[in-house]
Image: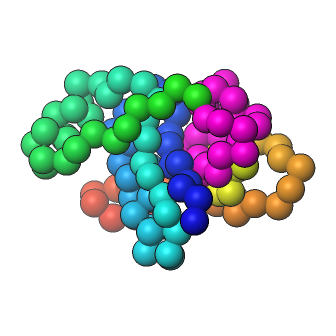
């Protein structure tokens, strides 16, 4: 079974990194081999969260190989993504931003703006 790399955008803030971790764990529950990655250095806020919770930082990657299966979270624009993304096999996108994305094959794409007020989602 091929490993699926899961990552957010090149400026890995807390929601981008935690989204990659949660999505990779979800994929594992579905029976897939998945690994959360980051595309840049974690900012101070995110480092604080990881240190406070005792969570190991995901592996840093700059580029993916041709044909590598990937899941994009918290982004969909090519300029915000990993090097060589155009030659990867994008299997899913889970995002909350406007869509600037096109592939020549069908994929799972979930885009939903989520707003949080007073600790409840509406």
* One can see residue 113 in this view: no
| Residue 14, quarter of the rendered image | top left
Furthest residue toward front: 1
Q: Identify the residue shown where x is 89% and y is 49%.
A: 104
What sort of colour scheme is used for the picture?
Answer: rainbow
Specify whether residue 70 is painted magenta: yes
| Residue 67, quarter of the rendered image | top right
Furthest residue toward bottom: 30
Residues 116 and 14: in front is 14
Find residue 93 and report its horizontal and vertical position in percent: 63, 53
Q: Is residue 77 above or below residue 15?
A: above
Q: Quadrant of the C terminus?
A: bottom left
Q: Identify the residue shown where x is 34% and y is 41%.
A: 58
Q: Horizontally, is 65 left or right of 40 in the view?
A: right
Q: Identify the residue shown where x is 34% and y is 56%.
A: 117
Q: Quadrant of the N terminus?
A: bottom right
Q: Horizontally, is 12 left or right of 67 in the view?
A: left
Residues 39 and 67: in front is 67
Q: Which residues are magenta?
A: 64-88
Q: Horizontally, is 106 left or right of 50 in the view?
A: right
């Amino acid at each position: 079974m091929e490993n699926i790399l899961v990552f957010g955008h090149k400026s890995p803030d807390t929601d981008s990194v935690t989204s990659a971790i949660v999505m990779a764990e979800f994929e594992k529950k579905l029976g897939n081999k998945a690994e959360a990655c980051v595309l840049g250095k974690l900012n101070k806020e995110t480092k604080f969260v990881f240190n406070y919770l005792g969570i190991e930082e995901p592996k840093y990657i700059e580029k993916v190989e041709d044909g590598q299966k990937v899941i994009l979270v918290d982004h969909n624009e090519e300029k915000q993504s990993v090097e060589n993304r155009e030659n990867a096999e994008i299997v899913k996108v889970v995002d909350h931003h406007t869509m600037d994305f096109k592939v020549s094959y069908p994929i799972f794409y979930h885009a939903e703006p989520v707003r949080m007020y007073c600790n409840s989602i509406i």
